[in-house]
Structures are given as structure tokens and as C-alpha cells.
Image (spheres, rainbow, N blue to C red):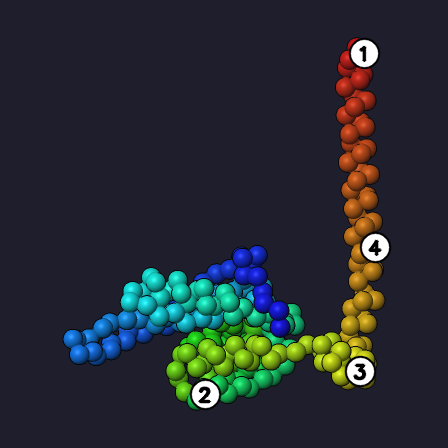
């Protein structure tokens, strides 16, 4: 998968979790932080990263840089995901299901901010395994990475859309047939508005010319 240029996207960052770590040495304890961050443009691109440093600002900066390197593109169908999926990463297991429009993001923990930054607005998601935020975030990213739309699956299998999902092919054909009608009506309305505007300009020009002759 080609790397996505994060600099070309309008990204938002959100800190998912901060964790304080103390390491004991011979001379005493050393305090450091690790931060889990998600970045996304709310339009099908999202990434997560982990940063470690002595201070929180440096850890957040490192996490954002790491997240931008791990950006993925999420295939969406309208406002939801294409199909149900379940992925296990370590001890964490995440399950996602498509939802009808208006449902919202039904998820919690580390899953919710990742889905929201990816641009998913309607989905049912649940963490079934470990509550560890880092493993849950990686499992969520794997779920989004393994999503496929019907056209991609047809291309990989060398089949047509009618063979694999005939109902979807019929729906797409109906949408394509309805689109030109709407386009023609919109074009006719635009032409009518243009003609009206031209007529108004002509009337104003004639009135100004008449006043000048007078």
C-alpha cells in the first residue's frame, strides 16, 4: 500500500491516552510518558501513533509524527463501513458492524476517536477483549485496513459486480438511470435563471440608454 502524504491533508489530532512510566535505576527513579494519538481528516484518512518522552509535549509531538507515518485510507459506503468485521490484535478484539444513517458512532474507549477522525458517522463497534487502549487502537486500525468495497473484491477475483452481488449492481444501475434526469432538470433550471438574468440586464441597459438620450 503506497504511503499517504499527510502534509496534503487537513488533519485533526486527538490524544487517546497518556500513561506515566517510572523506571527504577541504581541512582533513583526516572519518570517518562507514553502518549497514544489519533490523527485524521474526517474524510476517509486516519492514523494512530505512539510517542515516548520525558515530557508530555515531546511525547505528543512524537506520537503525531508516528501517526502521520501510519496513515491509511478507509473505504466508506455513504456514512458507514462496507461490511461487518472482527479483528484480534494481541489480547484485544474489536468487532464493527455497519449501521443505518442517523445511528451515530456507537463505540467507546480508543475505538470512538479513531472512527470519528476516519469520517465514519454511523457504525456499531465493540471491544470484546482486553481494555488496553493501545492494543484496542491497533485492532481498530486493522479492522479499518481490512475493509473492502464490492468493486475492489470483484476486481481482485476477476468477476463482475452482477455475478457477486446482483442486488448491488441493480441498485447502482437504478441510481445511474436516475442521475441524468436530475441533471437535465438542474441544467434546465440553470438555463432559465441565466435567461432571466440576461433579460434583466438588457432591460436595465435600455433604460440607461433612454435616460442618456433624454
Decide: is 35 above or below 131. above
- As measured in the structure, the alpha-carbon distance from the residue carrying label 1 to the one carrying label 2 is 88 Å
Decide: is 22 above or below 54. below
Q: Residues within 10 Å of mark 1 (few under 14, many from 20)?
A: few
Regarding mark 1 in the picture, which secondary structure is present there?
A: helix
Picture residue at 80% right of the left edge, 77% below the top: 170
- As measured in the structure, the alpha-carbon distance from the residue carrying label 1 to the one carrying label 3 is 74 Å
- Pointer 2 residue: 90
Q: Is residue 38 visible?
A: no
Q: Residue furthest top?
A: 214
Left or right of residue 56: residue 5: right
Given this view, does label 2 or label 4 mark the residue nearer the observer? 2
Given this view, does label 3 or label 4 mark the residue nearer the observer? 3
Q: Is residue 87 visible?
A: yes
Disc on res. 159: 3
Disc on res. 46: none
- Pointer 1 residue: 213
- Pointer 4 residue: 184
Of label 2 and label 4, which has the lower sequence position? 2
- As measured in the structure, the alpha-carbon distance from the residue carrying label 3 to the one carrying label 2 is 35 Å
- In the picture, residue 142 is in which quadrant? bottom right
Regarding mark 4 in the picture, which secondary structure is present there?
A: helix
Given this view, does label 1 or label 2 mark the residue nearer the observer? 2
| Rendering coords of residue 130 (x, y %) | 41, 87
- As measured in the structure, the alpha-carbon distance from the residue carrying label 2 to the one carrying label 4 is 55 Å
- As measured in the structure, the alpha-carbon distance from the residue carrying label 4 to the one carrying label 1 is 43 Å
Of label 3 and label 4, which has the lower sequence position? 3
| Rendering coords of residue 161 (x, y %) | 79, 79
Asked if labels 2 and 1 touch by Cβ distance under 8 angstroms, the answer is: no
Picture residue at 31% right of the left edge, 65% below the top: 56
Amino acid at each position: 500500500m503506497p504511503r499517504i502524504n499527510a502534509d496534503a491533508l487537513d488533519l485533526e489530532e486527538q490524544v487517546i491516552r497518556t500513561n506515566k512510566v517510572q523506571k527504577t535505576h541504581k541512582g533513583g527513579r526516572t519518570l517518562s510518558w507514553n502518549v497514544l494519538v489519533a490523527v485524521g481528516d474526517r474524510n476517509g484518512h486516519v492514523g494512530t501513533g505512539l510517542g515516548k518522552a520525558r515530557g508530555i509535549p515531546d511525547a505528543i509531538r512524537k506520537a503525531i509524527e508516528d501517526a502521520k507515518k501510519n496513515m491509511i485510507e478507509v473505504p466508506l459506503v455513504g456514512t458507514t463501513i462496507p461490511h461487518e468485521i472482527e479483528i484480534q490484535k494481541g489480547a484485544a478484539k474489536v468487532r464493527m458492524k455497519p449501521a443505518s444513517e442517523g445511528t451515530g458512532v456507537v463505540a467507546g474507549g480508543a475505538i470512538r476517536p479513531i472512527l470519528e477522525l476516519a469520517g465514519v458517522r454511523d457504525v456499531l463497534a465493540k471491544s470484546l477483549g482486553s481494555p488496553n487502549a493501545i492494543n484496542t487502537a491497533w485492532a481498530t486500525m486493522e479492522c479499518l485496513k481490512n475493509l473492502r468495497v464490492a468493486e475492489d473484491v470483484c476486481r481482485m477475483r476477476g468477476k463482475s459486480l452482477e455475478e457477486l452481488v446482483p442486488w448491488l449492481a441493480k441498485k447502482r444501475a437504478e441510481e445511474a438511470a436516475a442521475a441524468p434526469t436530475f441533471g437535465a432538470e438542474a441544467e434546465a433550471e440553470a438555463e432559465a435563471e441565466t435567461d432571466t438574468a440576461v433579460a434583466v440586464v438588457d432591460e436595465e441597459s435600455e433604460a440607461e440608454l433612454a435616460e442618456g438620450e433624454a
